[in-house]
Image (spheres, rainbow, N blue to C red):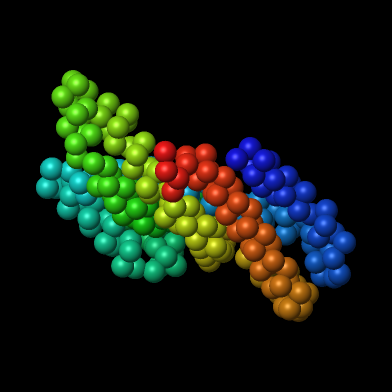
């Protein structure tokens, strides 16, 4: 997992070096492509981490014995899964500050919030399934040993649930990397926005779009490799 992490970091910081040798208009804009790729990965990591936390909270809400919490969590998941991500990004950036005047969001923060809310709803279902997969007998045994509900969740339920939920969580993270391209609609200068600006300035769409697609492919491959290392770290799918 350490090697996968180092590979991802080095690729992000050294991406401009090989791109500088590419034909025009790529070579002269290599630094902008590299900066866009780093911002894309920052969006993915921030929104993805927040989305896992939201997913845990929503999953616990859907499994709660308190009816209002179940309704709130179910409404959140249903609303997010039933509306397009593009609409959610635009709503958070344009409509949410209008509804909540005290809320000040720049383009990057709004994009992160919208992406986190979106992936959190999908994570909630994966984590809920993982929690429900934990044998009931283990929960009862933990209670019999005198463990509190919090300690039972932290020491018994969650470690087992996360192993079950990890593969779909990984898939959601990879999908989030590609979905982050919608942040360009609110002005975030991520990879897609960089490609769009260079294409508009040079009138050369083919090399620009091919380069953008190849960088996304590279980032997806690196993130998938990191995710596979993470699954091996948690021994997902292995018999003990």
196 relative position to 125: left or right: right
Q: Quadrant of the C terminus?
A: top left
Residue 38: x and y in percent read: 65, 51
Q: Is residue 158 visible?
A: yes
Residue 20: x and y in percent read: 85, 59
> Is residue 214 or residue 166 the one in the foreground?
166
89 relative position to 66: left or right: right
Q: Residue furthest top?
A: 146
Q: Is residue 98 visible?
A: no
35 relative position to 121: left or right: right
Q: Tell me if residue 39 comes above or below residue 60 in the rendering.
A: below
Q: Quadrant of the N terminus?
A: top right
Please name the residue shown 39% across and 69% down the image: 84
Please name the residue shown 20% across and 46% down the image: 63
Residue 12: x and y in percent read: 70, 49
200 relative position to 182: left or right: right
Number of dots carrying numbers: 0
> Is residue 54 or residue 92 the one in the foreground?
54
Residue 167: x and y in percent read: 44, 52
Please name the residue shown 70% across and 53% down the image: 35
Please name the residue shown 34% across and 68% down the image: 83
Q: Quadrant of residue 2?
A: top right
């Amino acid at each position: 997992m350490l090697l996968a992490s180092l590979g991802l970091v080095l690729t992000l910081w050294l991406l401009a070096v090989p791109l500088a040798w590419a034909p025009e208009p790529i070579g002269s804009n290599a630094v902008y492509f590299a900066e866009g790729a780093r911002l894309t990965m920052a969006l993915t990591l921030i929104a993805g981490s927040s989305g896992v936390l939201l997913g845990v909270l929503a999953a616990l809400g859907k499994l709660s014995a308190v009816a209002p919490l179940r309704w709130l969590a179910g409404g959140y998941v249903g609303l997010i899964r039933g509306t397009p991500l593009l609409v959610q990004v635009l709503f958070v950036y344009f409509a949410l500050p209008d509804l909540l005047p005290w809320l000040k969001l720049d383009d990057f923060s709004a994009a992160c919030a919208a992406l986190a809310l979106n992936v959190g709803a999908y994570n909630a279902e994966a984590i809920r399934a993982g929690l429900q997969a934990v044998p009931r007998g283990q929960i009862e045994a933990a209670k019999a040993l005198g463990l509190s509900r919090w300690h039972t969740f932290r020491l018994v339920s969650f470690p087992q649930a996360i192993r079950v939920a990890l593969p779909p969580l990984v898939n959601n993270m990879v999908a989030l990397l590609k979905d982050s391209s919608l942040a360009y609609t609110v002005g975030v200068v991520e990879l897609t926005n960089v490609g769009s600006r260079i294409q508009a300035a040079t009138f050369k769409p083919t090399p620009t779009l091919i380069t953008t697609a190849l960088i996304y492919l590279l980032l997806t491959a690196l993130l998938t490799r990191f995710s596979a290392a993470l699954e091996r770290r948690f021994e997902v799918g292995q018999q003990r």
